Image (cartoon, helix red, strand yellow):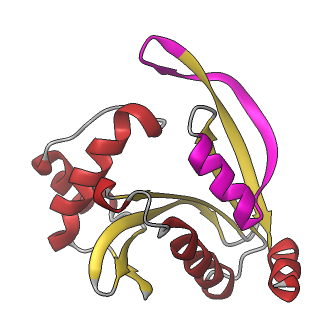
Amino acid sequence: MISFRHLEEIDLEFLNEVRNHCAKEYLHDSRTFSLSDTLNWFKITNPNYYIILNKDEKIGYFRLSNYSQLNQNIYIGADLHPKFWGEKLAYPSYKNFINYLFINYNLNKISLEVLATNTRAYNLYKKLGFIQEGIKRQEILKQDKFVDSIIMSLLKIEYDANILEN
């Protein structure tokens, strides 16, 4: 049973572990952070993050950014703890969270960016109904190579049509 809740200070060690593990290969920002850095960031920014739970066990987190109430859009991202990779938890996590976002944030559009080298995530997003909007060519320097950043989005009308089909 996948659920989620707002990030709390007690979750920061978990968040830091997951983020630092994913940063080098999968995130646009390759930097890693100490727990005290993460605590300071949390207190200063009050981020719009959610912990993902599977049967009350923390498995990852969602991050939200660039929310526009006026334009009814938001950016989303998620990272799962490596010990849960391959367990087919990302799809139901995103599916539940996307539904939550469309309802509770009154959204028309959810956007994300994925590195072109992250084919598993790209394929997951396509399966969820996200459409590729464009490419930021050679946007990110990863391990001495420039990597494209793919922009994808899901509109409410597309999401609703997908639900009716299934």
In the image, residue 76 sits, relative to residue 30, either above or below, namely below
Task: Quadrant for residue 148, please give it.
Answer: top right
Whether residue 139 is visible here, answered yes or no, is yes
- Residue drawn at the location 26% of the way across and 59% of the way down: 15
- The quadrant of the image that shows the C terminus is bottom right
129 part of magenta stretch: yes
Vertical placement of 31 versus 91: above or below? above
Picture coordinates of residue 25, whole percent (x, y): 42, 33
Determine whether, in the image, residue 57 is placed left or right of residue 104. left
Q: Which residue is depicted at the point 64% across and 82% down?
A: 99
The answer to whether residue 29 shows anywhere in this view is no
Q: Nearer the viewer, residue 31 or 132?
A: 132
Magenta residue check for 44: no
Outermost residue, left side: 36
Magenta range is: 119-145
Q: Position of residue 151 (x, y in %)?
A: 71, 44
Whether residue 158 sits left or right of residue 7 in the image: it is right
